[in-house]
Image (cartoon, grey):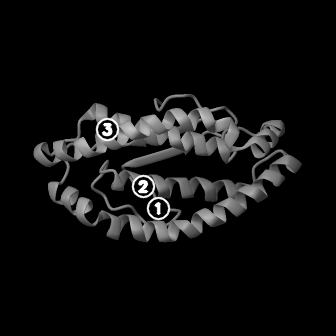
Amino acid sequence: MISLHIERQATYSRAQLVLRLLFGWLYIVLPHLILLSFVLLWAKILWLYATFYILLKGEYPIKTKEYLIHGMRWLSRVHASAYNLTDTYPKFGLNPEVDYLKLDFETKEPIDRLSVLVRFILGSVLLIPHVFIWSFRNLWNSILVFVAFWVVLFTGKYPEKWFDFQVGTLRWLLRIVGYQLYLVDQYPPFTGNE
């Protein structure tokens, strides 16, 4: 089970909002994505290593699992900032803890080897229904990001239901990725709810 919680601020900075709109791609997204590209490349190599390790031993290599989880936390911090869910600049690195975002994984040992083998062989095919439905949700999410920008700009507050929907969209995506990375055995539910 994957649990994601992002704390909604009471008020949002209008100056930060405009700054992120104009230059967020330059000072938030670009530097993080440059570094994360190396992190994700190494994560792909570790995922291959973990696949064969799990198939042989029935357990996840601990350091590999920690690396992948920390990488997903880093991506979540960048997502939360880029989508205006927080005014906080995302911290760099795999280990930083932040107060506004909690991403936890409830994993079970031993891992079902047959499930890992099926996910490795069929890979993306198993997740086609999720990706198809999630893409429509993400399209709606993008529209909400645009509209929420204007609401926050004029009111200083992020509408709670919209905020929850955006967090749910990210939660759903993390569940899909976590399933593919063998961090959870349970097929992800078709929802972003907790």
At label 3, which amino acid type do we have?
Phe
Residue 159 visible in the shown view: yes
Q: Is residue 108 left or right of residue 77?
A: right
Q: CA distance from mark 3 to mark 1?
A: 23 Å
| Residue drawn at 15 percent across, 46 percent down | 156
Q: Please give the name of the residue rendered at 79% of the width and 44% of the height, measured from the top-left corner.
A: 121
Looking at the picture, tell me which residue is in the foreground, 34 or 87: 34
Q: Nearer the viewer, residue 158 or 105?
A: 158
Q: Which residue is mark 1?
A: 96
Residue 14 coordinates in the image, percent (x, y): 15, 54
Image disc number at residue 185:
none
Mark 2 and mark 1: Cα distance apart in space: 10 Å
User: Quadrant location of residue 155?
Assistant: top left
* Residue picked out by circle 2: 77
The residue depicted at 16 percent of the width and 59 percent of the height is: 15
Left/right placement of residue 169 relative to residue 12 reads right
